[in-house]
């Protein structure tokens, strides 16, 4: 999608600090990290929500997050988050998962 910042990162029009890439997903370090490790895992397809046609992508993103957690030495644990809509605090409308770790994260959910 031409006006989507994540699509521009995938297209190489905006640089990123890449953590992982395969044919389905790209993972890169968040520009405004909320933890010592803060990686975004995004499908290369511009997906806005998970449904029956693309749920395999979401599963793959989780598998990549688990693999990166090992690579980035998050052996004490980590959190995977996805924000949806205004109440969820979503700012980029391209499905993405935050992988956070490297410190004790807050125990609250809200
Ligand atoms: P969300 O608020 O869940 O939509 O998350 C969007 C995330 O994208 C935020 O954590 C931003 O810091 C991050 N972000 C926005 N632009 C960039 C960029 N150019 N490179 C890396 N991360 C970005």
Image: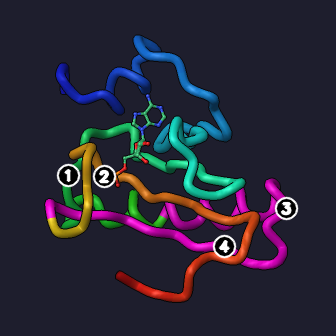
Point out the frontmost of discs 1 and 3.
3
Which residue is drawn at the image coordinates 43% and 26% (left, top)?
10
Which residue does the numbered mark 2 point to in the structure image? 95
Which residue does the numbered mark 1 point to in the structure image? 48
Instruction: Kindly report the distance in space between the C-alpha atoms of the residues bearing marks 4 and 3.
Output: 10 Å
The numbered disc on residue 84 is none
> What segment is highlighted magenta in the picture?
60-86
Which residue is drawn at the image coordinates 20% and 60% (left, top)?
49
Q: Are marks 1 and 4 in contact (CB under 8 Å)?
A: no
The image quadrant where one finds the N terminus is top left
Q: Earlier in the sequence, mark 1 or mark 2?
A: 1
Q: Earlier in the sequence, mark 1 or mark 3?
A: 1
Which residue does the numbered mark 4 point to in the structure image? 78
Q: Residues within 10 Å of mark 4 (few under 14, many from 20)?
A: some
Which residue ends up furthest to the left in the rendered image?
86
Q: Nearer the viewer, residue 34 or 65?
A: 34
Q: Are marks 1 and 2 in contact (CB under 8 Å)?
A: yes
Q: Earlier in the sequence, mark 2 or mark 3?
A: 3
Displayed quadrant of residue 77:
bottom right
Figure quarter occupied by ligand 1: top left
Q: Residues within 10 Å of mark 2 (few under 14, many from 20)?
A: many
Q: Are marks 2 and 3 in contact (CB under 8 Å)?
A: no
Where's residue 19, x and y in %? 67, 39
Q: Residues within 10 Å of mark 1 (few under 14, many from 20)?
A: few
Where's residue 23, x and y in %? 51, 37
Some atom of ligand 1 lies within 8 Å of the CB belonging to the residue at label 1: no
Some atom of ligand 1 lies within 8 Å of the CB belonging to the residue at label 3: no
């Amino acid at each position: 999608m031409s006006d989507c910042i994540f699509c521009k990162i995938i297209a190489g029009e905006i640089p990123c600090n890449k953590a992982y890439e395969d044919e389905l997903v790209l993972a890169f370090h968040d520009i405004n990290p909320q933890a010592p490790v803060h990686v975004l895992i995004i499908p290369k397809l511009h997906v806005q929500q998970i449904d029956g046609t693309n749920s395999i992508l979401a599963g793959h993103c989780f598998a990549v997050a688990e693999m990166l957690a090992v690579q980035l030495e998050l052996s004490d644990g980590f959190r995977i988050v996805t924000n949806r809509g205004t109440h969820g605090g979503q700012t980029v409308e391209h499905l993405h998962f935050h992988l956070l770790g490297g410190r004790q994260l807050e125990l609250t959910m809200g």
